[in-house]
Image (tube, rainbow, N blue to C red):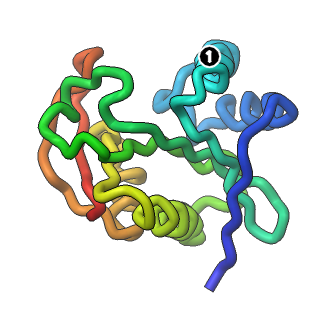
Amino acid sequence: MSEYTFRPMTKADYPMFSHWLDQPHIEGWWQEGATELRLIEDDLKTGLVDMQIAELGGTPFAFIQDYNAHAFGAPHYLDYNKDARAVDTFLGDSTFLGKGHGAGYIGARIAELRKSYPLVIVDPETRNTRAIAAYARAGFRKDKPATCEDGTPVQIMTYS
């Protein structure tokens, strides 16, 4: 079994993070690098979001963040436990694609979160079948389809 580790994201990670966002397998799921970095900087200042870099054998390959599901007023999370954690993630280094690492690092991080939180929620776009499959392999279950605040159809998945 692979040993995934997590460390807090820092400003030193910005060039790598931006490079990852420019990869073809990320395109369309996250905003372009400069826009996303501005959002990340804002979130780092507030302390509401725990942003982590996933590593395997000391090599960084993915980004994962979690936050209280109600912190940003997402309407599709209103019916869930007040202490639920929402997660957003992407596997940035394309050399790690197709090898089970997506489900692996997600499962490892969720195991850590479940020690402190009763429920973990994700909301991949309904057309992002690769993400939905990785979440399912990591132990998430489909709950319900919903529409997020910008009108995008999402599949809410839960881990409890």
Pick the residue in front: 107 or 47: 47
Q: Is residue 132 visible?
A: yes
Residue at the spot 24% in from the left edge and 40% down from the top edge: 82
**At label 1, which amino acid type do we have?**
Asp
User: From the image, which quarter does the N terminus lie in?
Assistant: bottom right
Q: To which residue does mark 1 refer?
A: 42
Res. 4 image quadrant: bottom right
Residue at the spot 66% in from the left edge and 79% down from the top edge: 2
x then y, percent, for residue 72? 36, 22
Q: Is residue 32 visible?
A: no
Q: Is residue 38 left or right of residue 86?
A: right
x then y, percent, for residue 63? 63, 45
x then y, percent, for residue 125? 31, 37
Residue at the spot 34% in from the left edge and 69% down from the top edge: 139
Above/below status of 58 relative to 74: below
Q: Is residue 65 left or right of residue 59?
A: left
Above/below status of 91 relative to 56: above
The secondary element bearing badge 1 is classed as: helix
x then y, percent, for residue 124? 34, 41
Pick the residue in front: 149 or 98: 149
Res. 98 image quadrant: bottom right
